[in-house]
Amino acid sequence: MRKGVGTSPAPRSWRGEDRREEPRRPQAQPAPARPGSRAMDEEGCAERSRRRCAASAFMLAAATGFLAIAALTLRPISPGVRAAEPADALAVLKAGFARPTFIPHPVDNPPTAAKIALGKRIFEDVELSATGTIACASCHDAKLGFADGEPKGKGVTGRRLVRHTPSLWNVAWSPLLFWDGRASSLEDQIRFPIEHPDEMGSTLANAVDRFSRHDSYVRAFAEAFPTDGPRISPRTIAQALAAYERTLVSPPTRFDRWVAGDPGALTPSELAGFAIFSGKGRCSSCHAGFAFTDHGFYDIGLPGSDKGRGGQIGLSAADHAFKTPTLRELAWTAPYMHDGSLATLDDVVRHYESGGVTRSTRSRDLPQGLVLSERERSDLVAFLEVLSSETPPQPSRETWVNAAMPAARAPPADTTLVSQANKLFHPQYVRVRSGELLTVVNDDTRTHNVRIYDPRFDYNSGAQEPRETVTIRFPGPGTFEAFCAIHPSMRLTVVVE
Amino acid sequence: MARLTRKLWVGIGAVTLAGASIGAMAQEEHKSHARPAPVDTGTATSTPADGGETYLTDGGPRDPRIRFYRDLALMRGHLLVGGQLIELGLWDEALAHFLHPTEELYGLMEKYIELHNMRPFRRELQALAQTVKAKRKGAYEQALSVVDQRLLEALGVAQKYMNPLRGFTVRSATEVLKTALSEYQSSIEDGRFVKPVEYQDSRGFVWEAERMIERAAPELGRVDAEALARIRAELAKLKAAWPAPMPPPAPILSPEELSALISDIELRASRY
């Protein structure tokens, strides 16, 4: 959580537009800084002019959310009194957090299934790094909320990086990227980690060279960029990666159900936490909108000499200011803050209670003397957790997210299919011919695996998430007993003839 | 966690129905906080018709405090053996041991956690499992430290209702050993290990039971040093069955030999 006065790159013009009706605009709309805030992004004019147009729709909606929350902040809600408030006040508040209905892809990089698939492939390819050992996914691991779960990660040199790896959830809506906002679009952002000597230590030109040697990449680029030439270039690599990263939309949670009108979706404790979040705690002054970020930069009083935004724009008033992170899927992306110094959400809340380091740049909007009871702290943490999926999250599969997503790959033709569902293999006994493949697809809602522990064949599929398949080729004829090591009562007998 | 687990899985549905009754037991426990009830050494074999809980008919302990302590210890046993496998670089092998705490145990403990106002820790366990799926040592260590903290907090709350603690500790440790025996039996078919995960489960549980005994050892030694020495000796013999986190080519001790050793430990534990 970050809060307080700081720079906010978001256009703040607000005319009450409904984001869901907002058309994609060719240019971002300049807007004044938030009333009462200290504008610190003096380079902002030039930067804003470069900003991707489609982000403006979200910004307008974020402003809508901010004003709604500001209204609420003036009159803090609590579960006990909320029912007595005008229904439209809560409706306005909820509208500020409503999920978007489209991804703001820029007009000069429209998404296609081929481009997104290519971007995902590049994202997971270690060829991007100088040593051939680090991919984007090495630090932005899908299993770890597109972060790395460590206070500070490592790149090709093995040295600890300077800052904590941020999650990539909802980056489609970020007008500025990185903790210090040094990139103004996803397409622009791509080159920084590739070229940083401590991260991937390579160059986009090097990536072009490597990909051009692979026929499958040549074909994939031709399919993704049919009218462009030359097709493998720094620009197309960046566009493919950016198109993929824009699909990393956090999935709906119980909070979204509540916003959408299900009053029973949140527990009393979570509702009480929301009241603190939007009232006494003043968290929502910065953590606003669908993604729970205003995309601004604030010094929240964490110790350290890192200048953050100030160092980036050469403005001492912005020293120690870092970007407001999204709170979506927060429970899956610990540790927290730009330095990864806080291990739990409890620690985060206690940081704001303590106020952090006193210095001239520290945001004046940070709550002064915030004191929470154990119960209040617990409620606030409960609310923060409800912004996360109940189980390890996958990118949203809402139809508006999936509009241009690639279709799932069909299993190979020469294979016997076995399903995992309801903690059983279906069927539980199969015959395959020697040399024939056995494909096991996880049709369940939980992680499974396939484990065969036999002197003739020691096989472990590793984690097999829902909808994932594994294909097994047996070493020769015989009967093999396969189990799910996670649910050992799941048994599959395979007779290879 | 084969046999016991299967019974426990059956019990999951029942525990929902039986929640109110279990809640009543726990409330009773709360009422007697100032002077906690002595350990109930009974075995949960009563039937619903007898006024018992279906949840408590798996042959495990009837006392919910021991059940909770046992289940918490089983979680720690899973994490312990999982950590040993990770140290060997066997991440895929370790994964099940980080998923079992939520897949098999947490649901059974959840009502107790709620009733005693413990901080829930399901998501922390799941986040830890994600780091193992990702095979990232740094993230794993970070997440494990959070889980360790949560488990210690939960144990701290639970132990407020255990007096004398040594009695609950040895009884719970014995239950952990019985579960280990069940796992060990399930890992073997036709005289060889076919389910390494069950073998590893049992190893983790035995190692955790030993840790429990050792944590209580100063007090146990004061009460009956001879019984403690015997328990330690039997544990040392028992551990020979698990020479490494991966199974040996053939079982070193038979389930019957393990059962005899565990029975002896249980007998000595009754001194406390």
Image (cartoon, coloured by chain):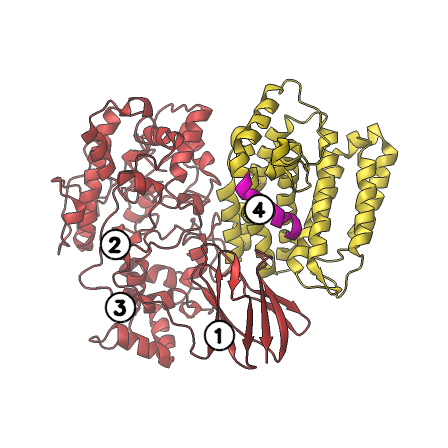
Colour chain B is painted in = yellow
Residue type pointed to by label 2: Ser
Query: What is the CA distance from the residue labelled 3 to the residue labelled 2?
Result: 15 Å
Q: Which residue lies furthest to the front in this view?
A: B49
Q: Give the range drawn in magenta.
A: B1-14
The amino acid type, in three-letter code, at marker 3 is Arg
- Majority secondary structure in the magenta region: helix
**Left or right position of A53 against B171:** left
Which residue is denoted by mark 3 in the rendering? A235
| Residue type marked 1 | Thr
Marks 4 and 3: in contact by CB < 8 Å?
no
Q: Which of A24 and A342 is in front in this view?
A: A24
Give the percent coordinates (x, y) of residue A317.
29, 38
Q: Name the residue under label 4.
A: B10
Q: Is residue A18 above or below residue A413?
A: above
Chain in red in the render: A
**Of discs 1 and 2, which sits in the foreground?**
1
Q: In this view, does A351 lie to the left or right of A58?
A: right
Image height of A174 relative to B267, above or below: below
Residue A416: numbered disc: 1
**Which numbered disc, 1 or 3, marks the residue that appears first in the sequence?**
3
